[in-house]
């Protein structure tokens, strides 16, 4: 079969359209990589006051990791939207999306938790010399996210509802930690983020939520019916109110409400 010049042009345009969602997916991966880089570069710093007291903290620029993961989340939403818009969904796009997600919402958030654990342990007596074994649990998040994505890819029943918390939700939750740490007006919130046992609890809770088979709603509107979208509307209203009054602390609050609504209004 021999194609004419016009037919080759049509084929070329079709192939280009198919690649547009993949470009968005690769941008997701790109910003996830940037989040990892800035998290590693910021690390923890040790300074000494004039009276010789030791001061240990995370440089404020670690908020850039939160920014890049947030951008990755926006791009992750757009790649699916663009794929539907151009009718360009493909099997390679599905696999590529999972590979990008495991970096942006699995590995990058694990690095944030890793740094918070380092800071938490460093503030303890002789904590600087703590074994790396105490830091390794941070990467359970990335492992759980990878397993969750692999299971999702072979399950055809998760179109309008998920089995387990989707990895972007878990990743965005953890991405809020640096912003909460640096901008929270209350000391008790900061102290919670610097408690290693709380951090271990978050690691295992978030990881379990991802690999569980709990019915979690997808944030897609099936139609414009209010009745069929009540939990999503409630979540949206709570998100707006929480953002106004709680600022960045709204992220974990909305995450918890998201799970509660999903369990109450089972899909």
Image (tube, grey):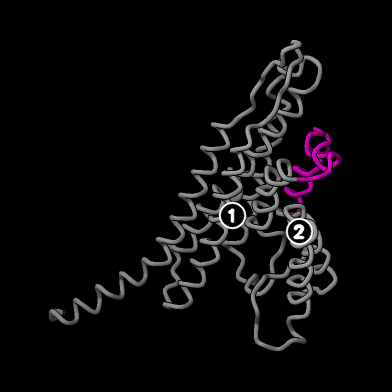
Q: Nearest the camera: 204 or 128? A: 128
User: Does 176 sit left or right of 71 as displayed?
Assistant: right
User: Mark 1 or mark 2, which is nearer to you?
Assistant: 1
**Residue at (73% x, 21% y) in the render:** 55
Task: In this rendered view, identify the residue nearer to me: 249 or 6.
Answer: 249
- 237 left or right, relative to 104: right
The tag earlier along the polypeptide, 1 or 2, is 1
- Neighbour tally class for label 1: few under 14, some 14-19, many 20 plus, Cα within 10 Å: many
Snapshot quadrant of residue 220: bottom right
Magenta span of residues: 184-209
In the rendered image, which residue does mark 2 sit on?
A: 255
Location of the N terminus by quadrant is: bottom left
Q: Secondary structure at mark 1?
A: helix
**Residue that carries the numbered disc 1 in the rendered image:** 70
Residue 236: % across, % down: 73, 71
For the stretch drawn in magenta, what is the main secondary structure?
Answer: helix
Quadrant in the rendering for residue 128 = top right
Magenta-drawn stretch contains 207:
yes
Asked if the stretch drawn in magenta spans residue 208, the answer is: yes
């Amino acid at each position: 079969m021999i194609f004419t010049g016009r037919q080759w042009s049509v084929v070329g345009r079709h192939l280009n359209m198919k690649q547009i969602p993949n470009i968005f997916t690769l941008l997701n991966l790109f910003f996830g990589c940037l989040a990892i880089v800035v998290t590693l570069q910021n690390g923890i710093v040790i300074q000494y006051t004039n009276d010789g007291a030791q001061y240990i903290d995370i440089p404020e620029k670690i908020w850039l990791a939160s920014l890049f993961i947030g951008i990755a989340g926006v791009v992750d939403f757009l790649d699916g939207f663009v794929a539907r818009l151009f009718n360009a969904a493909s099997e390679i796009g599905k696999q590529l999306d999972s590979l990008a997600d495991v970096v942006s919402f699995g590995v990058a958030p694990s690095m944030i938790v890793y740094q918070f654990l380092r800071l938490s342990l460093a503030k303890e007596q002789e904590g600087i010399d703590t074994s790396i074994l105490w830091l390794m649990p941070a990467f359970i998040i990335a492992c759980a996210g990878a397993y969750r994505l692999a299971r999702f890819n072979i399950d055809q029943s998760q179109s309008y509802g998920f089995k387990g918390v989707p990895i972007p939700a878990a990743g965005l939750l953890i991405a809020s930690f640096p912003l909460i740490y640096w901008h929270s007006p209350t000391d008790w919130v900061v102290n919670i983020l610097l408690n290693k046992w709380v951090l271990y609890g978050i690691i295992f809770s978030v990881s379990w939520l991802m690999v569980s088979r709990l019915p979690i709603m997808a944030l897609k509107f099936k139609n414009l019916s209010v009745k069929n979208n009540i939990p999503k509307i409630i979540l949206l209203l709570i998100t707006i109110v929480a953002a106004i009054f709680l600022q960045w602390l709204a992220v974990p609050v909305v995450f918890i409400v998201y799970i509660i609504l999903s369990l109450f209004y089972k899909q």
